[in-house]
Image: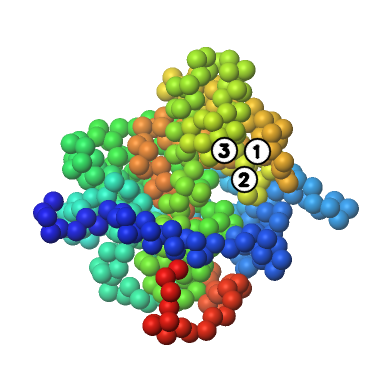
Amino acid sequence: MADNEINYSEITPEIKVLAAEAANSTIIDSELYRQYDVKRGLRDLNGKGVLAGLTHISDIQAKKIIDGKEIPTDGHLYYRGYDIEDLVKGFTADDRFGFEEITYLLLFGHLPTESELADFSNLLGSYRSLPTSFVRDIIMKAPSHDMMNSLARSVLTLYTYDDAADDISVPNVLRQGLQLIALFPMLCVYGYHAYSHYHDGESLIIHQPDKSLSTAENLLRILRADSEYSELEAKILDVALVLHMDHGGGNNSTFTTHVVSSTNTDTYSVVAASLGSLKGPRHGGANIKVIQMMEDLKRNVEDITDEDEVRAYLLKLLNKEAFDRKGLIYGMGHAVYSVSDPREKIFRSFVEKLACEKGYNQEFNLYAMIERLGPEIISRERQMYKGVCCNVDFYSGFVYKMLGLPEELFTPIFACARIAGWTAHRIEELSNNGKIIRPAFKPVSPISTYIPMFERKKA
């Protein structure tokens, strides 16, 4: 770096001083939230989300009302009124891929006929082609170590290739959404290969997708050097995509879709904002934390088949004595589900099959043990307002690991699924001509009188 060149990543001593001042000036007494009945995080004291909208797209049910009281029950997830368990059983029983079929359901409100599904799949296939030189000029230049940022940059750049980028009519937004659904796997995988080539010296792999294949098959085809995959691998990845497509309108990234869409901005800006939300470790990045936690466990537990040793490690996690010292067992607990997460229940049976095929039986048994012990230990050690269950993130990272997916692509794969739900929610927001979403914040600073410069004293 030249002497006169600025290091934009450096946190200087001056910045540290100013940061402390900025942070101290914005700290709010937590008691004020209770005093003014502020639903912090748009949740009440019991963790229940504030009702901020209506949706046809999907629904979560995790309790029943009995004699006027809310009773926790096994969780259910519905896409357009259909139970996710029935949908997965339906397409897996018929031995077909489900992502395209359920995308159709989310977008149009009904399950497709055989001919409707074939036409829709062909339409998606026709969109699996990036603009000329896009890979060379955009993806290959300045590759990022973070694939979510790379994906967001690619999405924003596609705006410049779209002659109708700012048209927010439903036909145009649908066209844009379908193109993004089709292109996301390519944008993610090509971004990863570009980074691994330039920064890690790996061979540069750019496979073209096969327009006749499903989304799951194409993901594995363009990721792997030999483009080979087993039917079980593709089918399990397909199920993973279906389970992550949508999760009610209240999850952070989908709410972001509604908020930003309500401003009547373009599709590419909306999707980039939603990607920024999903990237966060409190949202889409949770499955990576599970994998990292499990690797730490295997390094620090002598016998991973010994239940007492594993239990002791889990207690250390809760007591902030192990792994990242955050006091969390990652993959345990959920904002809505308390008895069971339906996505985890569905996924688990497929995970076991893949573990047998890949020779990960011992590791699967470890996951199964923690799934059993985790909720029990958390409930005993923590004062909880509701039950604790294993969530879908607990197993999804393990599946991606067995499929040979790099950790850098875990959250982008989530995005490849969730873009279908975001598109449906964006169309719903625009179709209902809602007002711009603008919640209120109560000011708690005292009113100040202006002080002339010569009278001011250093804080």
In the rendered view, tell whether residue 287 sits above or below residue 355. below
**Residue furthest toward the left?**
2
Q: Identify the amino acid type marked 3.
A: Leu
* Residue, disc 1: 389
Query: Mark 1 or 3 closer to N-term?
Result: 3
The reply to whether dot 2 and dot 1 touch (C-beta < 8 Å) is yes
Query: Mark 3 or 2 closer to N-term?
Result: 3
Q: Residues within 10 Å of mark 3 (few under 14, many from 20)?
A: many
* Residue, disc 2: 334
260 or 102: which is nearer to us? Answer: 260
In space, the residues marked 1 and 3 are separated at their CA atoms by 13 Å
- Find residue 365 and report its image quarter: top right
x, y percent for residue 141: 18, 54
Q: Is residue 378 visible?
A: yes
x, y percent for residue 293: 48, 32
* Residue, disc 3: 328
Q: Is residue 178 visible?
A: no
Q: Identify the amino acid type marked 2.
A: His
Q: Residue at x 49, y 58 (%)?
A: 253
Q: Identify the amino acid type marked 1.
A: Cys
Q: Is residue 422 left or right of residue 167?
A: right
In the rendered view, tell whether residue 43 sits above or below residue 393. below
Q: Is residue 252 left or right of residue 359?
A: right
**Residue furthest toward the right?**
67
x, y percent for residue 458: 42, 70
Q: Residue at x 65, y 53 (%)?
A: 60
